[in-house]
Image (cartoon, rainbow, N blue to C red):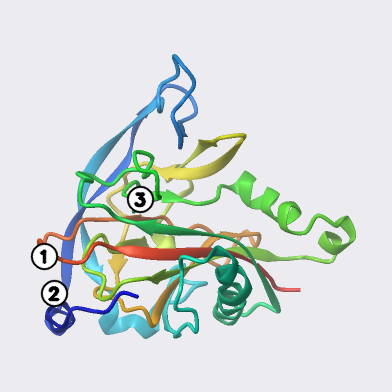
Amino acid sequence: MNTPDERFLRAGTSRLAHTTGGLDYLHDSAGTPFNYMYPPPDGEPWENCSYRTHVVDIIDARPGAQHFLLHRQGFELREVASCVDDFDDDARIRSRYYPEVEAIACEAAGGVRALCFDHQIRRRSRDEQQLTFGRQNAQASAVGRVHNDYSEASGLRRLALVLPDEADRARIRRYAVVNVWRPLIEPVLDAPLAMCDARSVMAQDLVAAEIRYPGRSGEIYVLKHAPQHRWHYFPHMTKREVLVFKQYDSQASGVSRFTPHAAFLDPAAPADAPLRASIEARCLVLFD
């Protein structure tokens, strides 16, 4: 079990109003962008697209944390301790952590029911020179490319994947896909998560991209750079805190729908800061 280093906890008392970070945006693509998440078949490239790093201001959201809301900016910070202390046991995560996540997502979104359908543990390693999609490592790592986990098309498909019964789906008028992100080390100084205010993202900034896994493919949005994007983060997160953010909402207007995000290397982080480890879980939140 990881225990916090007191030096780094003390560092959390002197926060900057903002920092800067290099975020990788889509630069060019030969057709619909695709990225392999495993060694591609012979003769196939890892990807058919290129990314360019843009150094952006990333604002410390803690002073006004109460003003950031899931349905407005697309994300919010909550303090909710977990009773799970072993995140190496997949069965325990599903049996004990999933119900916690469902309660968090349902309360944040104001839904009547939430169904957690998957999770991902990410751990950084010392040999990583940059943040990409984490494909170079056997274990998932922090993602430095600006993305949203769902597109319009894959968001629509997710309902049937979680609720295969057609009669159950027919009763649902609105649903959302909500992520709950929790650190597994504290405080988070290495590769914190930057969130883009959903209100600063235009439809033309979103580019549907294929993510290829063994035996299946998914569709996400990658982002074209736009100077109006407003980036925020919550520095020095602890294991008692979670970031709740929306990846899709079937309601087409009046609420946040897509919340781009990416990890970044904070230039203010100590060189010997503990490497970031985190768990993210995705929930289908039902409003009807």
Instruction: Judge by depth and name the residue closer to the eye, 161 or 76.
Output: 161
Answer with mark 1 or mark 2, whichever residue precedes in sequence.
Answer: 2
Q: Nearer the viewer, mark 2 or mark 3?
A: 3
Asked if the residue under mark 1 is in contact with the one under mark 3, i.e. CB atoms within 8 Å, the reply is: no
Residue 39 vs 229, above or below: the answer is above
Mark 3 element type? loop
Q: Which mark is residue 143?
A: 3
Residue holding disc 1: 268
> Along the polypeptide, which appears first: circle 3 or circle 1?
3
Q: Residues within 10 Å of mark 3 (few under 14, many from 20)?
A: many
- Residue 139, x across and y down, in percent: 40, 49
Q: Amino acid at mark 3?
A: Val
The CA distance from mark 3 to mark 1 is: 19 Å
Circle 2 residue:
16
| Residue 55 locus on image (x, y percent) | 18, 50
Q: Position of residue 70 (x, y in %)?
A: 49, 73
Labels 2 and 3: the sequence-earlier one: 2
Task: Please name which of the two marks, 1 or 2, marks the residue nearer to the observer.
Answer: 1
- Which is nearer the eye, 98 or 66? 98
Please give the name of the residue rendered at 56% of the width and 41% of the height, measured from the top-left corner. Answer: 219
Is 193 drawn above or below residue 110 in the view shown?
above
Query: Which quadrant holds residue 182?
Result: bottom left
Looking at the image, which is closer to me, 175 or 275? 275
Left or right of 51 in this view: 99: right
Q: 230 left or right of 109?
A: left
Distance (Cα) linking label 1 and label 2: 9 Å
Choose top left, top right, bottom left or bottom right for residue 66. bottom left
Query: Which SS class for mark 1?
Result: loop
Q: Quadrant of the C terminus?
A: bottom right
- Frontmost residue, 228 versus 124: 124
Task: Say if 274 sits above or below 38 in the image.
Answer: below
Around disc 2, counting alpha carbons within 10 Å, would you say few (fewer than 14), some (14 to 19), or many (20 or more)? few
